[in-house]
Amino acid sequence: MRSYNQFCAMARALDVVGDRWTLLIVRELLTQGPCRYSDLQRGLPGIASNLLADRLRDMEASGIVERREEPPPIGTTLIRLTERGRDLAGVARELIRWGAPLMLTPQGDAAFRMHWFSMPMRFLARDNTPEAQPATVRFGSLSDGCDALIADGSVEVVACSTDREPDAVVDGPPEILVALFTGMTDIAGAIDGGLVVSGSMAAVRRMVPRPGPTAAPDRSTTPATGRLPS
Amino acid sequence: MRSYNQFCAMARALDVVGDRWTLLIVRELLTQGPCRYSDLQRGLPGIASNLLADRLRDMEASGIVERREEPPPIGTTLIRLTERGRDLAGVARELIRWGAPLMLTPQGDAAFRMHWFSMPMRFLARDNTPEAQPATVRFGSLSDGCDALIADGSVEVVACSTDREPDAVVDGPPEILVALFTGMTDIAGAIDGGLVVSGSMAAVRRMVPRPGPTAAPDRSTTPATGRLPS
DNA sequence: CTGGATCCGGGAAGATACTG
DNA sequence: CAGTATCTTCCCGGATCCAG
């Protein structure tokens, strides 16, 4: 990107991360951890191959990502965020917070990856029964998903891991997941809308916000702000 | 900007504010308040006139800004942020926080406007003598600057106002201001470097962080992180 | 298969002149 | 003051091809 050439912290930040696709690459690495080139391609539907290569070069030059050759059994090079790159988590968080209300207006044919939902879920999930034993709920699958670790009154959302045996596995269309986690529907309604739960239904119920008066089932009369809690 | 077409809060946020110049227009309106078209042009050196007009149209369509015809004595139309636009303050804050370390590396001929410094100053300024009477320090001038209101142990930074009589007026080259507020130099050194203070030197000293061990005057041996305090 | 490079068309961004 | 018009430049997107 052409520099704005302004002596201003925000302008200089945008000089570095303001390019198209750059912050979405950061999103992938923040939610997925170290990735192969092809993992990034799968997580960034619509990006041209040359653009991904260009961006990774730029981001490596500006110290946001680094490449490392992995010995067998991985046997390929992984791309990961540097500490400076991980520091962009605050920017990502605020963009997600601001963009969340936009998810309530439908957008026809948008692509969806379950792991994209992991950062918003950190705001929306809660532990309704803090005194219960820890539980794990997997959303999506190992190839595209995230694990919610419920314990001691809070929920931690991390990338899927093979060495974790979830108590429940959840999948479903993105609109239903949004409706469920924003309290616009309850679990019964979500299952009606296409949510699939296998395993412990109690573990799922434990982490989902209870539908409350903040929910706006009729959007034509009470437009939901969809604002995420601070 | 072409939509990313992804069912993801961050991607949808960037669909709206990811265009070049858009977030810098938000910066202007956040720091300056309602602006005329020509105010925005002055605050955004380098922007092409047609691009500014295009962006304002887009931002009005997406509900971030609104235009309002002002009756005399203003007699022209002011552009202001909507509430949804003001909600972008969190994104701006995190971008500034992340971009702040980049200000320590010089960049030759960059343009500078004093009011750009007002948001970073919110992180960096402090009230060293909370028990003292309130004081006001103006940075720059009415046409391009900001006022720091020091009272009760904290500093509030706002746009300049004609109905405020500052106790001190400060001006100087941006590099010196950064060095002063990051603790890399003291006031004496700053004045040596071109800082100009008129009025109450005590009011200025009151709000400037004391140079401490965190400062790294020699960047070749101890690279300063420049990280802003949380 | 992974990890790119290369080429090309269209459209966004940039520069400048002009106008009600 | 608040834009519009026009022209140029260059980045993005899409397709294809290629080396290990």
Image (spheres, coloured by chain):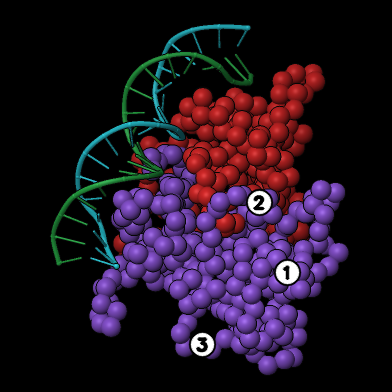
Chain colours: A purple, B red, C cyan, D green
- Picture quarter containing residue A176? bottom right
At 45% across and 73% down in the image, what residue appears? A143
Residue A193 in percent (x, y) is at 70, 66
| Between marks 2 and 1 in the image, the one whose residue lies nearer the viewer | 1
Q: Secondary structure at mark 1?
A: helix
In which quadrant of the rendered view does residue A166 lie?
A: bottom right
Q: Nearer the viewer, mark 2 or mark 3?
A: 2
Residue A192's label in the rendered image is 1
Q: Is residue A23 left or right of residue A73?
A: right
Of the residues shown, which amino acid type is indicated by label 3?
Arg
Q: Secondary structure at mark 2?
A: loop
State if disc 3 and disc 1 touch (CB < 8 Å): no
Residue B104 rendering spot, x and y as whole percentages: 42, 53
Discs 1 and 3 share one subunit: yes
Camera sees residue B180: no
Chain name for mark 3 = A
Asked whether, in this view, residue B86 is left or right of residue A216, the answer is: left
CA separation, marks 2 and 1?
A: 19 Å
Subunit that carries the residue with mark 1: A
Seen from the viewer's position, the closer of residues A170 and A12 is A170
In terms of sequence position, does the residue under pointer 1 or pointer 3 come before the other? 3
Q: Are marks 2 and 3 in contact (CB under 8 Å)?
A: no
Residue marked by disc 3: A164
Would you say residue B22 is visible in this rendering? yes
The residue under label 2 is A106
Residue sitting at x 55%, y 53%: A110
Q: Residues within 10 Å of mark 3 (few under 14, many from 20)?
A: few
For the N terminus of chain A, the image quarter is: top left
